[in-house]
Amino acid sequence: MSPPRRRDRESLVRPYLITGGRAHPTRNTLDLTTLIQATRHADPALLSPEQRRTLRLCSGGSLSIAEIAAHLELPASVTRVIVADLVDQGHLATLSTEWQQHGPDRELLQEVLDGLRALR
Amino acid sequence: MVRSAGAAGLTALAVAGAAAIARQRQRIMELVREREQHLAELEHLRTKRLPALAESLNGMSSAPVPGPLRQEDGTFASDSLAELVDVIERIVRATREHTEHSSRRTLTGVLDTVRGLASEQHMAVSDMQHRHDDADVLADLYTIDHAGSQLSRRLRGFAVLFGAWIGQQRSATSLQDILRGAQSQIRDYQRISVSAYNPSTQGDSVGDLGVITRVVEPLVLLVAELLDNAARYSPPYAQVAVGVQHAHNGVAITIDDAGVGMPLEERRRAERLLSKQEIALDEIGDPPRVGFAVVGLLAVRYGLTVSVDAPPLYGGMRAVVFVPNELLTHIETPDENEVRQKASTESAGGEEQSTPARQRTSGGLPKRSRRTRETAAAQADSAPPADSDSAAGLAAWQQASDSSSAVSVGENEDEDPHA
């Protein structure tokens, strides 16, 4: 992994194209730390490449919006629009709703703690 | 006797003199006729041949330049003028070429200055989109970004016409991203629907196909010009459908609009421009209409084939871009990439050239690795994973949280071999 450096090129597929010109996500409940996980399989032919990659990212476990954005190399704002659409279509779910129903998951908290320790 | 002999002599003299006079008179007549023919020839040169030659050299007329005058007996009065005409033609051609060449040089210089500034502005807008999180601000940034993308496309088109470098080398890119990149660069991008994802179980699906580095930017520009044209010649709410089909020895990109079709005169102009090897500056027109000229030049330069026609089955136009196999490459899907990563201890971040050349698909295309971020994506199966990628992900998280940071997520080295 190279050290972070200033973007020195213009990406080919522009953010406005990826979101279809929409800057506002369909729900404003998604912040950078919101955890997202895949809920059901989708027909890849009906999805955009970014939607496909987002589903693939979230299929192995839950990820935060910030992490999805980093992996997609897209602005967090664009990632929010993509994720909100997938949540609307029922392919993704936010974990916070699970929390409200069942309380925090011990395993998940442990994973977050491990991650935070690894940062030091 | 003597007298008669003298008389005979005189007679002979007189006869000889008369004959000489007659010969001289005939010679004079011939010279007069020749002079008249020469004058007529010069007049013909002045009033017919040179103006026609000038028109032909300036591209104003494609009619043949008339030759010298033919006499009643089928001969030409003079061929000496032919050489003069050749000299004049050579001088005019040389002058035109010199003017064309120096104009192109000047225009390329001007263009480079403008391109540099436009690119700087476009990148600033890109960075702002990474830094700002307010949706209203982003909506405005999208507008500026869209205008910047169109500007950049126009400038690249002019570069192609001036014979300058098209700009920006990109790594091998999937056909789908090429089509969407082209879509990004036109005004009515929302009217374009791209369907380039055709998963297939046999070898190369169109979804895995991409084009080699050298052709990425030219193909994006070529497709963008065709999309722009399709959107312009169809009703403002009609969709323009873009697809990819396998063809013999390559793939065909199809662009269909549901318009009324182009007027015949426009079609003829388009066909003429599509078949040209070179386009002079004075053919660009005012206001400049460069779409088909750019498409034609790019196709010739990069070995692509373009046809535009109006299929009788439905209204509108169909443009087809044929990309031959030698310009195609297999873009590895993240899943394949992951398998390969697990199979070897090769660290992520190698340049695309590091993929062994012997790796080939069933279709015989060389395999190339997509950007390693795909690998990261494929490996990210838990939050947060405990490998080197997690550090990157979490660093990005920190960065994304820190809205004052001017630095976005670092890109992989193989993103740009020319950086």
Image (cartoon, coloured by chain):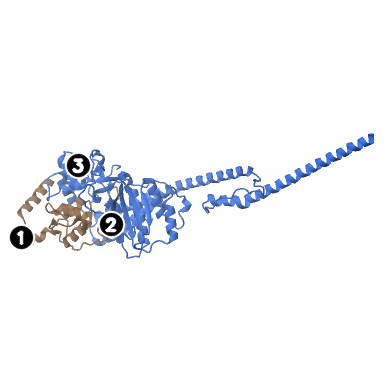
What mark, if any, has residue B348 been given in the picture? 3
Asked whether A43 or B315 is in front, the reply is B315
Picture layout, residue B186 above or below residue B218:
below
Q: Which chain is brown?
A: A
Query: Crowdedness of circle 2 by 10 Å Cα count: few (<14), some, many (20+)?
Result: some
Read off the chain for label 2.
B
Q: Position of residue B407 (x, y in %)?
A: 24, 49
Which residue carries the number 1 mark? A102
- A32, A45: nearer the viewer: A45
The chain carrying label 3 is: B
Q: Residue at x 63, y 44 (%)?
A: B81
Mark 2 or mark 3: which comes first in sequence? 2
The amino acid marked with disc number 2 is Val
Q: What amino acid type should be assigned to the residue bearing mark 3?
A: Ala
Q: Going by the image, does B344 lie left or right of B357?
A: left
On the question of residue B288 being in view, the answer is no
> Is the C-beta separation of discs 1 and 3 under 8 Å?
no
